[in-house]
Amino acid sequence: MTDGTLLYQGKAKSAYLTDDPDALVLAFRDDTSAFDGEIIEQLAHKGAINNQFNAYIMTLLQDAGIETHFIRRLSSTESLVKRLEMIPVECVVRNRAAGSLVKRLGIEPGLHFTEPLFELFLKNDALHDPMVTEHHVRAFGWATPAELDTMMKLSLRTNTILTQRFSEIGLDLIDFKLEFGRFQGRIVLGDEFSPDGCRLWDQATGEKMDKDRFRQKLGGVIEAYADVARRLGIVIES
Ligand code: TMP
Ligand code: ASP
């Protein structure tokens, strides 16, 4: 399947070429980074948990009609995906205030919004992923107006689907980040969806069940990820 050639090494995943030019193998590693790669630690089992978590979420979204790059899981830590031409913009949807929004606008953490908020960030660690507007995305040619419109609509539909699914297991989906790419002229969801790239708060206790446990040195990071996976009915293979 993989021809062993490393195409790209990200902070938490590596992408390898395969004998099919339209497909890649994504390998989820145990590396865990925060603050744009300033802190990196190995958390045992995270690669396996995130790969299997991502497979579950991508399948759920695919079944709801959102095209994703996910083809199938290959092993505990690897998945086969469509090779996309990535758009260098991160799409964030927020339902309640947390993280950079709280700092940027001085908003009370946990504030509920009257409607979900859609934000765009340039994917650039050296610049600390600065916020950009849809006008930047168009003016620099990162995506066309039609592509941007599709990315926004797919992000908001993802929010509806996942808010509902996490609510069924007693979790509030506070915010999350998606990345899209082009495949045969279509906009397709890429990258991953895991507790590394979203915020999930327990509805009963308010406990954080996502990467904020790592960023804020709260401990129990992998235990929290595994608990969310278990509640979703995912049986993690190691
Ligand atoms: P933020 O509050 O830091 O802007 O992040 C909003 C959400 O998007 C949060 O769930 C974390 C996620 N995110 C990433 O996973 N990677 C990133 O590079 C950024 C900017 C956000
Ligand atoms: N994903 C980014 C990083 O690892 C931002 C973050 O999660 O804090 O460095």
Image (tube, rainbow, N blue to C red):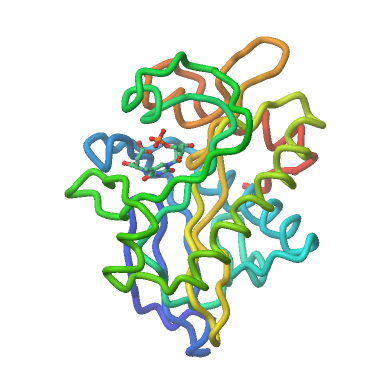
Image-quadrant location for residue 199: top right
User: Do we see residue 45 in this rendering?
Assistant: no
User: Where is residue 212 drawn, in percent x and y?
Assistant: 45, 26
User: Where is residue 224 drawn, in percent x and y?
Assistant: 59, 26
Q: Is residue 228 above or below residue 19?
A: above
User: Where is residue 103 drawn, in percent x and y?
Assistant: 33, 23
Q: Is residue 120 left or right of residue 185?
A: left
Q: Residue at x 58, y 53 (%)?
A: 51
Image-quadrant location for residue 69: bottom right
Q: Residue at x 31, y 45 (%)?
A: 131
Name the residue at the left extreme.
126
Q: Residue at x 40, y 29 (%)?
A: 101
Q: Is residue 108 left or right of residue 55?
A: left
Q: Is residue 181 above or below residue 10?
A: below
Image-quadrant location for residue 42: top left
Q: Classify the position of ligand 1 by quadrant: top left, top right, bottom left or bottom right.
A: top left
Q: Quadrant of the N terminus?
A: bottom right
